[in-house]
Image (spheres, rainbow, N blue to C red):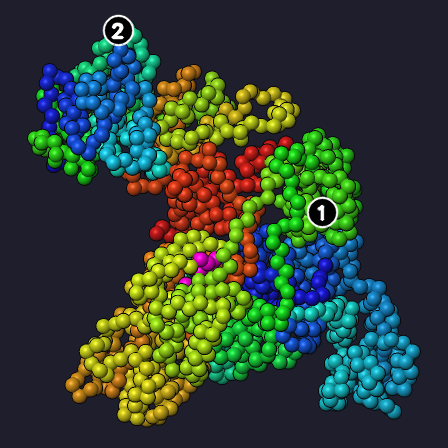
Amino acid sequence: MQTVTMEVKNEDVADAIRTLLGRILALDEIDAVMVPGRLPGSRSVMPLLIHDPDQLDNSDPLSPAFALNAAKQVCRLTRTATPKRVAAVLRPCEIRAFIELVKLKQGLREQVIIIGSDCPGAYPNKIFDALTREGDDSGADHGYVKRPSVDESSLSKACRACEHPMPTGADLAVCLWGVDTGREVMVDAQTDSGREILDRLGLKATPLPDQRAAAVETVVAERTRFRDSMFAETAAATDSLEKLDHYFAHCVNCYNCRTACPVCYCRQCVFETNLFDHDPLQYLSWTRRKGMIKMPTDTIFYHLTRLAHMSTACVGCGQCSNACPNDIDVMSLFRTVAHRTQAAFDYQAGRDVAERPPLSEFREHEFADTAGLHWRKEA
Amino acid sequence: MLRENYHAVIIGAGIAGIRSALDLAETGSDVLLIDRAAHPGGLLSRLDAQFPTDGCGMCKMLPLLERDSAEATCLRKGFFHERIDFLPATELSHLEGGPGRFAVRLKQTLQGVDPQLCIGCGACETVCPVDMPDDFNSGLSRSKAIHRVVPHAVVGAYVIDAAACTRCGACVPICPTGAIDLAFDRRKEFSILVVDDELSVRDSLKEWLLNEGFMNVQTAESGAEALTLLEQSDVKLLLIDVKMPGMDGVDLLKQAKADHPDRVAVMMTAYATVDTAVEAMKSGALDYLIKPFDPQAMLAMVNRVFQATVSVQERQVTAGAVILAGGMTLFDPGEGVNPYGYGTHPHVITSLAFERVLSGCGPSQGRLVRPADGKPLQRIAWLQCVGSRDCQISADFCSRICCMISLKEAVLAKNKSNDAVETTIFYTDMRTFGKSFEPYRRQAEEERGVNLVRARVHSVTASPESGDPLLRYAGLDGRMHEAEVDLVVLAAGFRPSPETEALAELTQAERNAWGFFQPQPFAAACSSAEGIYLAGACTEPVEINAALIQASAAALEAGRTLRRSGSQLALAEGPAAKGVAPDAPPRILAAICTCHGCLSETRNTEKLISGLTRDPAVVQVLFVDQLCGADGWGPLEAAIKDVAPNRLLVAACHPLRHSTHRRALSRRTGLPENLMTIVDMKIEPTEPQADTTARSLRTALGEHVLSASLQMGVAFLKHTDPTAPEREQVQRKALVIGGGTAGMHAALAIADMGYGVDLVEKENRLGGNLAWLHHTLEGHAVKPLLDQLDDRVIQHPKITLHLEHEVVNAVGRVGDFRTTVQNAQGRTEILRHGVTILATGGLEAETTAYGYGTHRAIVTQQALERQIGSGEADAAAWDVVAMIQCVGSREPSRDYCSRVCCPTAIKHALYLKEKNPRVQIYILYRDVMMTGFSESYYTEARRAGVVFIPYRPQQLPGVETSPDGIVTLSVRDPIAEVDLKIEANLLVLATGVVPRLPAKLAAFYGATLDSGGFFQEADSKWRPVDGLREGVFACGLALAPQTITEAAAAGQAAAQRALRILCHESLSAGHPTAAVRHSLCVLCQRCIDACPYGARSVDLEQRRLVVDPAMCQGCGACAAVCLNGAAILNHHGAGQMLAMIDAAVE
């Protein structure tokens, strides 16, 4: 079955999705569902791994909170094969990150049924925290998608610049745009696994509405506009080493951005290994040469290295900025660079699990100019 | 430094000689490699790029196991192996003894520059006034009389062309190391006697000679006076007038030579008595001069004699075996009729010269311009078969490699010009006979637009309007055509190298009709003389891959002889060094070469010392003169013993030259080699014209560079891990899969060297295709070969034969494989072995083309051979026999030439013609692939009346059959432009060869198959029998289509490559080697993708990444792709590199 509808009662779209999750959890082959939600009594929304269907009430599948990118958590569940599979509700950027990690052999794609939805965006941690602290749940509860007129400007910058808000790569895509969410949401199967699941849920088949494509296009166009102006501003703000120094002036080498980054998959960052425990004579030799150096050293080196290491895998989720204690706009720079490095390899992080990471394969005929092979004909 | 006793002497240091030398050295032999040229590399040193990669890969010949024994550097720069000594400009002068005990006398010509002292700075070149054509660039550019021997040479970088040198002496004082010796003193002493009855001749000769620096000239007016003078002094050279009163010149000569046969005499004669002078040469005169003579010619001759006397050094060594690897030389197209105007038309050059045009260090630095006038090249024509396949000049053979060279040159020219240049090759048959050749041709022709025109060019003249070359040729249509081009490249064929004749006399090795050495039947590497083996193109013009296979086979034969004669091999298992405790703080001894006093003059030594000792790890700084030679290494050794450092830093010129020193020093002092580093002092030539500011700037820069290099060396050593690499045990047994020609040869070769062999054969008998082959093209019967091999294999105590067994599974890696074999009853057995040789063979391809299978008169070549063998073939009953070549071959579906079909067809045609001279034979072909000397059988077949008709794959011949047993062929004759009908009693199809190497079997050993299903070599040219996974080799038809002799050689080559491994009890990793820091590794496996040697894998049980240290070549690709330093390169760690970079920018 390709597409089914789920009835929306009391304008509660999240509840319709909970119903869907309940049915999936009831399937024999599914052990548990991972979905954002709150532990009883907690204000924060985190991924919950739910086995007991009754606990689905705690889930918040459409929460505007985005405390962390859950791709790494999915890897923890799929590192090796298990007898049964799990289902996971993921944002599009989490799906993309997971696909990158699968390519890097950090998780098994076939071990998880991915459920994604059109992503209206999320709040930065600080804003979400403020909203819940004030006791005003209006912006933070399940009703998030009831009011399409959410204040875009309060969304995180990464979300506003996200031109891929569709759950590409999910087994099941929950379609909100172009759909009358007052009455129903639609669930579209995007993979064979997804179709098999839908076949067994006993839901009503339906075609996707015609107006959906236009609705998606509007969102993408607006975000692409925002993104391009962000690229321009960021490029201008970092186009020299001096400006780059300013950009990262508040960086304290805490490496939170790399911990929060879903595609920084190293067990321990090279900057935290003994490689950067320089010989004391080395620091003295540096300051002797320059007259003065900033401590800790290696700040720009760290960011440049991280750009070199993961910009081809950057999915633009913005968790780096979210994690920065000193409000450095890490995401804008990384996305700006990633956009170019990925374009150079005609690559898009998370697009397709079959595409190999650019630096993992050698193509004899690429970068003819760089390699001095300008005479090579394109194969 | 030279040894007196060697296991083998190899004559010729081209790629075949290098391959043989390395193969022998890697199995423990001490080898002396000599070459008549002043540099190693042979012909290939002038060819920068080879097909199919269009690049160079010479370095792939270097050792991969125990690789620290050789310097891993570009082979074009030089060649260094601890068990190989190389003597440049050296020839064999005498040979005595036999296998195991040859006494070898050698003659080395000194090049005027001491290679031990020359640091390659180039100062001499800047002052040399002699401008002469540059031989290396085929005379297309200019050089000085003192010049680099090859542009990138490191050791013995400079040589003097004695003939061109004017002995002005300018280079002597400018040489910073005093390396140049123009022999002025010996010239003064060189004793010359002029004997002539005419005073004017005596006086003028003496004056000319004095002006030339020959101060010891005596004169005599008669023979009698001359004899008196000869008694009184040690005269080296006599100039004797033929016609003198009393004792004439010839009598004097005879008497002068009687006492001192090595005395040189040159006759002087008037034109009328030239005959007498010629006669005198039989009595021992070197040459003659005709009066009145040109002083320059006379002086040139005297100089030649002088050079030959003073610059020749004799050496005597012993050797167990001798390998002849002298290669071949290019045919001179200017010889004889010269229809293409070579040497007279400025825009006609040879293919070798065009290689130089394409080269970055060529006459135009690689720009595609016409050498004579610099005009950008737009139209180039190649003319094939110049000096080959030409009975008129006694060259009834094919030079074999010219077709591919021209195709490659055309493609390289296309590359250089962004496809703008128009390239046309005029050819007779495009002989793309090797595995990757046909696809290369297809790509060149179809994708790159290289024009191939089947025509023999009649003449080349200059266009009356432009002066450009104008070609006239007859097309296939029979009409004359003209084409104007910018440049004509003559694909000149090859001839035996010039010393072949002398070598044949000295070694008693037989030569063939064309002067190449003649190998024994089915034994390509064996000469007719015992203990003398043949490698490479000295037996036939061959391509790189065949040369290397034969070279390895020659090494194998030499090794066999050594073993039979009881020679002891010297294999050092592991370094003698004691090692250094990992936690011992670094103690660095820095030794800086003062380079014959240059350093103290130009560099601030105090500053160097204070800069170095700022780091407490540097315990002492030592200045030593001539660290590059024995003079310096003695004091250094003493200092190491005295200071007891655990690291050594040396600054000297050209670190590459010191690799053998370094190893010896390590042996003597116990300091591990990997804890020594040599940094380049980078002495730059000081141009005499430069002003003081420029000089001081240069000095300052030099100081800065030296200081930075030293600091980098300190950083490198401080961070070097002193732990010695681990060693892995070797199962010293081989598995050979397949008992055909190649497999039996491989098994016997390894078993003869004393190692056990398991030979697994699917059938219930040995022999493979030898069972049905009757005789070879050359007329050798096949049965005796099969019987002999069969006997030897069955009786060999070291060979365990597993008939009717198949391999069902295998695991392991080089040094330790475990293979499960199964017999017909299903019983299995596990074999353990250190190496694997795949010799699974091949078959005649099946076909349904041309009505095969529908009529009994349509057979394959194999069926015909069987009929001949069984006596069934009744040639007398046939009036007409037709053959079709390339059935199903050289088409996109089977994109290779099977190589054996053309020789087989011609062999059968000649057989049938012999049995029944009236039989009419038609051979329908695409290109007749009769390469090398097999060409002569093609000529013979045409003379015998066999008719060859070409067809194009776009228009295949038609076949119809009739019930009366007649097969009717229809084919279009492209020359006569008519449709022919041939009614034949027999139609024979050449369906070609297909390999019988199951992909699954190959995969057991980590081997892969190429597009034709053959074994994929690590490199088709440079590692022709190796798999990419070390320890796995292939030979015979599983490797490529080949003849019996080629399969035998490939079997031996594979065995030799395997012996490199079996000769070790354990294998050690080289420096550097990759390792894994497991605490950091997340098993993303990017390093596995990146590793080009297949050295990395995941241990699934332990869930960790493992590196096979014997297979790792230390390239560092894994460390580069690993993001957090979990993949590391020992001795080139990231921290080490960062510290070195910091030191460099300090």
Quick check: B620 above or below B521?
above
Quadrant into which the N terminus of chain B falls: bottom right
Q: Which mark is residue B822?
A: none
**For the residues marked 2 and 1, what is the alpha-carbon distance in whole angstroms?**
79 Å
Which SS type dominates the magenta stretch? strand
Asked whether B178 falls inside the magenta stretch, the response is no
Residue drawn 55% across the image and 41% down it: B1130
The reply to whether the C-beta atoms of the residues labelled 2 and 1 are less than 8 Å apart is no
> SS class of the residue under badge 1?
helix
Asked whether B837 falls inside the magenta stretch, the response is yes
Task: Tell how many labels.
Answer: 2
Q: Chain of mark 1?
A: B
- x, y percent for residue B556: 54, 68
Quick check: B901 above or below B624?
below
Magenta residues span B832-839
Q: Nearer the viewer, mark 2 or mark 1?
A: 1
Q: Which mark is residue A135?
A: 2
Q: Is residue B847 left or right of residue A254?
A: left
Under mark 1, the amino acid is Thr
**Residue on which disc 1 sits:** B669
Under mark 2, the amino acid is Gly
Can see residue B1144? no
Quadrant into which the C terminus of chain B falls: top right
Quick check: A303 above or below B1102?
above
